[in-house]
Image (cartoon, rainbow, N blue to C red):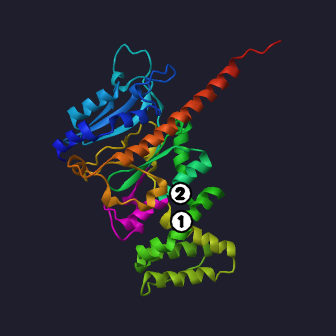
Amino acid sequence: MDFEFLESYYRTYFPCNDLCRWLNQGIMLETDNPLDNKSYFERREFSFYLQGDVSCRHISFSSPGEFREQLIHDKPEKFGIGAVYTIPPKTKNLKDKEIKYEPVEREFVIDIDMTDYDKVRTCCSGAVVCQLCWKFMVLACKSIDTILKELFGFKINLWIYSGRRGVHCWVCDPAARRLNDFKRKALIEFLNSGPNSNSRFLEICWEIFKPRFEEIIVQDQKLFENQERLNECVEIINEELGTDSKFTVKGSSEETWAEILEFIDSQPDPQLIDQIKYKICFKYLYPRLDIYVSMEMTNLLKSPFSVHPKTGNISIPILVENVENFRVDKVPNLAGLCEGTDDLTPYVEILNNVSDQLRESNRKDRKRRSAISHVQNVEPRL
């Protein structure tokens, strides 16, 4: 990591005010509106990861200016974001504090790591990601985003490319931020359940996965040119049919898949045929979710616009509707920014659009909660 570039990035290019606005419910911290909660940002936990593998938690700031100055001074290789607490995290050890230090809000976060796809990709492995295996992330973003919106009503989802081998989703809706750990665990386990979930869940994924299965698994990854991976597919068929069928690799992945498909379609029960195809498709294409990142409010996740210490890439927002065209080899880089060849402007605009949605959503939520409180406090007339 070039620390001169890093200092220059934090001083000149890092969108500090825009990030802080997003972390403050979409509200600029310089607001004069007395109804705006100016302490929200102050109670947000940050973590810095410094040179020498040193990590510092329970950091907090009173303003974007203070935040930027600390970044410039410490030059963290990356930094993470945690929950909003009852009091500013930096005051948690003060002896005279009157309020218990505990989390009260935090975006519901989802982490999808490409290394978890190594059993279903042949183009790359480990931390390496190319445009072929990026297609797995395309389906992950589209399916999870649609499920969050249609089944749970979570509309404000900020998707972030991590800078190396995966994507993060920050679900920012007020209702999502207030989920307790029990509900977070239940939600991520539901999202991770794949074909064992409800019918609309299956429909959403099937509509997204089915048109891409042969392209990605059979043609791009050529998965059925490998006998071991072919056996995993045949195992699904045998479990459903109660048989002991065997298939061997043909000349190409396409030829092998054609033989398997012919065998499946020859079954007399149409529902069973669909069930087998569902399970094969879900096995290879369903998103691999790191459920432990999502389960607890106190867990940290790398911040948008943080630098990835291994690649120097910036963790940037991406649009689900444009995720198909995203290029992993065109991501803004620390060196590129400092040398004037890269630009963060389009990615900051994505973040600001989310902040606009977040502010409006919070305004409506505050109005609704105020109305409910008023009704509950009105004394009945005799």
Q: Tag 2, which secondary structure?
A: helix
The dot on residue 143 is 2
* Residue 107 visible (yes or no): no
* Residue 84 visible (yes or no): yes
Quarter-of-image position of residue 271? bottom right
Q: Which residues are magenta?
A: 111-139
- Up-down: is 189 above or below 179? below
Residue 307 drawn in magenta: no
Q: Is residue 206 left or right of residue 40?
A: right
Residue 94 position, x and y percent, is: 34, 17
Identify residue type, mark 1.
Phe
Q: Is residue 84 left or right of residue 309?
A: right
Residue 322 position, x and y percent, is: 46, 57
- Up-down: is 206 above or below 156? below
Q: Is residue 293 left or right of residue 339?
A: right
- State which quarter of the image contains the C terminus: top right
- Up-down: is 19 above or below 238? above
Q: Which residue is mark 1?
A: 209
Identify residue type, mark 2.
Ser
Q: Are marks 1 and 2 in contact (CB under 8 Å)?
A: yes
Which residue is found at the position 44% from the left and 63% from the top? 136
Which residue is found at the position 65% from the left and 58% from the top? 199
Which residue is found at the position 53% from the left and 68% from the top? 281
Residue 133 drawn in magenta: yes
Quarter-of-image position of residue 46? top left
